[in-house]
Amino acid sequence: MLVFYMRKENMSYLKPLKRRRLVKLVLVTQHSNKKIAGIVGVSENTVKSYRLKCEQKSVKVEMVDDANDSELANIFGVGRKVSCSSLKCPPLDWVHDLMQERHQTLMQIWHSTRLQDPENFISYSQFTHRYRAYVKKLDISMRQTYSPGEVAFVDFAGKRIQIKDPESGKLTWVEIFVLVLGYSQYIFACAVNSQKTENFCLAQQKGFEFLGCVPRAIVPDNLKAAVIKAGKEPHLNAAYEEFADHHGTTIEPARVRKPKDKSLGELGVLLVTRWITVVLRRRTFFSIEELNKEIARLLVVLNNRPFKRFPGSRYQRFHEVERAAMQPLNSTAFEYGAWSYNRTVGKDYHVDIEGHFYSIPYQFRHEKVDVKVCADKVEIYQNHEHLTTHKRSFVVNGTTTNNDHRPFNHKKYAQMHKSFFLAWASGIGEGAIKVVSEQFKNKSDHSSKACQACEKLKVLENDFGVTRFEKACQCALRIHSPTYTSIKSILQCRIDEHEMVEEGGAGNLPEHSNIRGPEYYKGLRGSHV
């Protein structure tokens, strides 16, 4: 048992997703090592090692987003341990006095004092850890406070509102989504069809667009749309985590049975329920768009209500202070997609997705891939690298194949098809199209005999040019002999350059031993080489 509890957590032990999440929390947030360790479910020393590695190698968020799991693992090895027992730290009472000034941050204080002796100064994470411990001793019942742009709380209200179908009269319940910013307590709310992940992400997208910016972290309650499995090591919904990555923010689920983690979120839900939901439940709405217009109108009133204990309103605190401290909004709206992991690629380099088979480069046959299914497209990944994208198909047992995914011999065989030769002929003319169609008459689309004849016709077109080949095809059709042999003879004898034959006769064709009269063809019409 002693060995179990003393198991060492080194940097290479972490799973790829946990490593990626830890690094993003270190780079994006200003959390202490202890808080990040609690969120990710690792030791403080592990977080400390990653933070040190980030500083040493100047790791940026963009590097993490662009790197696959293997590349990210190579960046972070097992770092050496750094002792901070003898490092310098400014007086915490002096720091606390400075923090009472508007716009002052711990980062500014740490950076300015660290310049005096950078080599022997305490790290930023240890500095913030000591300061927060100091503040807790000042007031044991101190209210939670958040810096501008630090966090947003999201949740669904308990009370719902009904929508009435104008034609059938059927009533449908819709959910009320609520977002509250930690510093200004600025509120956003809207109605969505359900609490499913797709609607949860859609509602937050609308919330960010309403704000025009993005917080550094999101704190959801432990609903299934956000957290698949709660606990010390929460398992996040992959689509929701992708939503956060898209907007450059992080997800910090509220801890189970820790009400203070989500107190502001519950306060926002209470206010929305009291000032918006209860009011609108007395009315009849015929569409969710109509309902959201009324919610938006009442939100203006709610956010402009003056605080009871503070000067100003939510609207003023957001626009005067918090908005400038938040991250910019991604110009591209998030596109929701349902993820499916560890799908096996068949030996035919196709993967089964909802009963339809999509191709990937043949080099990945027999391997595992991850799939993202969007409304109109399917994206396939491996090891965080994008492999291919297909237009989504709903044809069960159908196949969608990119010809570039085939090996050379398969590409060659795939061309041996009626549709391929018709596509080639369509670039020449009507005569060529009819000649190709005649080769496949009463034969299958993969007929080897017809395909061989068409391959020979392609050689003629290449040797004699498009114009002469098309005229030769028309000439062969006039004499009811659209075969490779006839077309070759017409081109070699330059018959296509003379007057075209009349329907049913030889016209003014020049004499030649290879040209037969109309009597020859009476019993042979429809037969081909």
Image (spheres, rainbow, N blue to C red):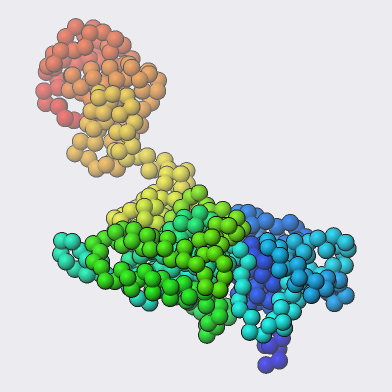
Residue 58, image x, y percentages? 74, 56
What residue is shown at x 17% (from left), y 22% (from top)? 480
The image shows a total of numbered marks equal to 0
Q: Report the residue that reaches farthest toward the bottom.
A: 1
What residue is shown at x 37% (from left), y 60% (from top)? 297
Residue 260, image x, y percentages? 55, 80
User: Along the line of sight, which residue is nearer the eye, 445 or 100?
Assistant: 100
- As drawn, is 373 to the left or to the right of 246? left
Residue 111, image x, y percentages? 78, 61
User: Along the line of sight, which residue is nearer the eye, 10 or 433?
Assistant: 10
Quadrant for the N terminus, please.
bottom right
What residue is shown at x 28% (from left), y 23% (from top)? 429
What residue is shown at x 13% (from left), y 16% (from top)? 503
- As drawn, is 491 to the left or to the right of 239? left
- As drawn, is 259 to the left or to the right of 1? left
Quadrant for residue 112, please give it.
bottom right
Quadrant for the C terminus, please.
top left
Does residue 115 show up?
yes
User: Along the line of sight, which residue is nearer the eye, 453 or 122?
Assistant: 122
User: Along the line of sight, which residue is nearer the eye, 424 or 194?
Assistant: 194
Quadrant for residue 484, please give it.
top left
Residue 94, image x, y percentages? 80, 71
138 shown above or below 281: below
Does residue 338 show up?
no
